[in-house]
Image (tube, helix red, strand yellow):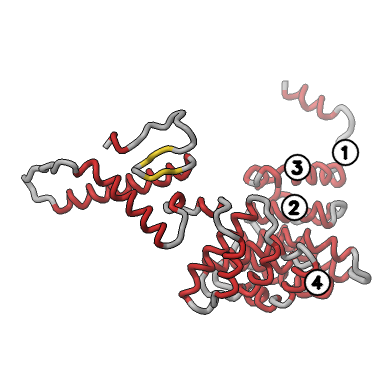
Amino acid sequence: MANQFTEFGNHGPLQNVGNIQVSDLSSAAQMLEQTVLSSVQNASDFLADRKPGSHYSHAPGNSTSTFSQFGDQMVHAATAKGMNPLAAGGDAHFFEDAIDPSTIRDYLLQSDPNHPGSHPKLLTSLKWLLASMSKGKDVSDFFTHVVKLVGISKLELRKMVYMYLVHYADHSLECREMALLSINAFQRALSDAEPLIRALALRVLTSINVPDVLQIQILGVQTTSRDTSPYVRKCAALALAKLSPRLNLQPDSDDQHQILVDILVDLLNSDSATMVLSSAVMALSEICPDQLELLHGSYRKLCHLLTDMDEWGQVVLIGLLVRYCRTYFANPGEGSAALIDDEKI
C-alpha cells in the first residue's frame, strides 16, 4: 500500500496520489479521503460476508490494487462527464479558470428550470457564479439569466439563486429594473416553507433601491418581523436599518418612518432571541440613536441577555446602555461611590 503513494516533499509542483496527479494539496486531500473511504467500505463488506471461524486468505496483489483501480475509475468518470479530473472529488474546480464563461451562459440559456434534467447544468452554473463572486469577480452580466430562476422548484438551486440576487440586486440600474420584474416572486417567497428562503427573499426584496417599492418592502419587513424563525426575524431587524436612509430621502415619509420604529420597538419588547435583539439594537443605533426612551420596556431584558449576544451586538448595546443610564438614572452625587466602598471595607 505504501508503494502507491509518493511522499509529499519538495518534488516540484505535482504530487502523485493513487496514480492521480494533482496540482494542489486540497485536491490531494480530497482524493485521499475518497480513497480511504472506499478502502474502509471494502473492508467492511469483507467482514460482513466472512463466516465465523474462517481465516482471511490474502490474495497477492489485492492490497496494492485497490487505490490504483479507484484512482483510475475517478479519472475515467470525470473525463467522461467532461469534468476536470483534478476536481472529481469535490467542487474545487469551480475556483479554477478552466470553465469558460460562455459555457455557463449557454447552460443558463438552454436549460429549462421546470425540467429536472436541466438541474445538473443549472447547478454547475450557479456554483461557478458563486465561486466567482467569492473570488471578487464581477459576474453581474449574468443577472438577467439568473433572475428568471427565482421560481425554480429545487430547493438547493433556489438558495443559490437568492444568494446571487442578494449580491447584485442593487448593483446597477439594469439589475434593479430586472429585479423589479420578479418582485411578485420575492413576495410569494416570504411565505415559503423553508426559513432560509424566506430570509433570502426578504434580503433581495429590501436590496432593491427603488422608491416606488418602498411600501412593499415595509410590508415585507412587517410580515417577517413576526416570523416563527429567529433568523428570519433577525433579517427583518437588519432590513429596518437598510430602509431607513431611503425614507429620509423621500418627502412626507414621517408615517412610514414611524412604522419602522414601531416594528423595532415590538422586536425589542417581545422577542427573546439574542440574535434578533442584537440586530434590533444595531438597527436602533442606525435609525434613531437619540430616542433612548425606546429602551424603557426592554432595558432589564437587554441587561440580562447582554452576555449571550455576539461581540458586535455587545459593543453597540453597551454604548446604548451607558447613554441610557446617564440620561435616565438619578445622579447619586459626588463621592457617594467612595463612601459605599468605605462602608464595605
Kindly check if marks 3 and 4 are in contact, taking CB atoms under 8 A apart as contact.
Answer: no
Residue 260 against residue 8 in the figure, above or below: below
Q: Which mark is residue 266?
A: none
Q: Secondary structure at mark 2?
A: helix
Labelled disc at residue 281: 2
Pinpoint residue 125: horizontal percent, then vertical percent.
56, 64
Q: Nearer the viewer, mark 3 or mark 1?
A: 3
Q: Residue furthest left?
A: 53
CA separation, marks 3 and 1? 19 Å
User: What is the C-alpha distance between the residues marked 3 and 2?
Assistant: 10 Å
Looking at the rendered structure, the kind of residue marked 4 is Leu
Give the CA separation, mark 2 to mark 4: 22 Å
Q: Which mark is residue 214?
A: 4
Q: Residues within 10 Å of mark 2 (few under 14, many from 20)?
A: many
- Looking at the rendered structure, the kind of residue marked 2 is Val
Q: Which residue was labeled with disc 3? A: 318
Residue that appears at 73% across and 73% down: 178
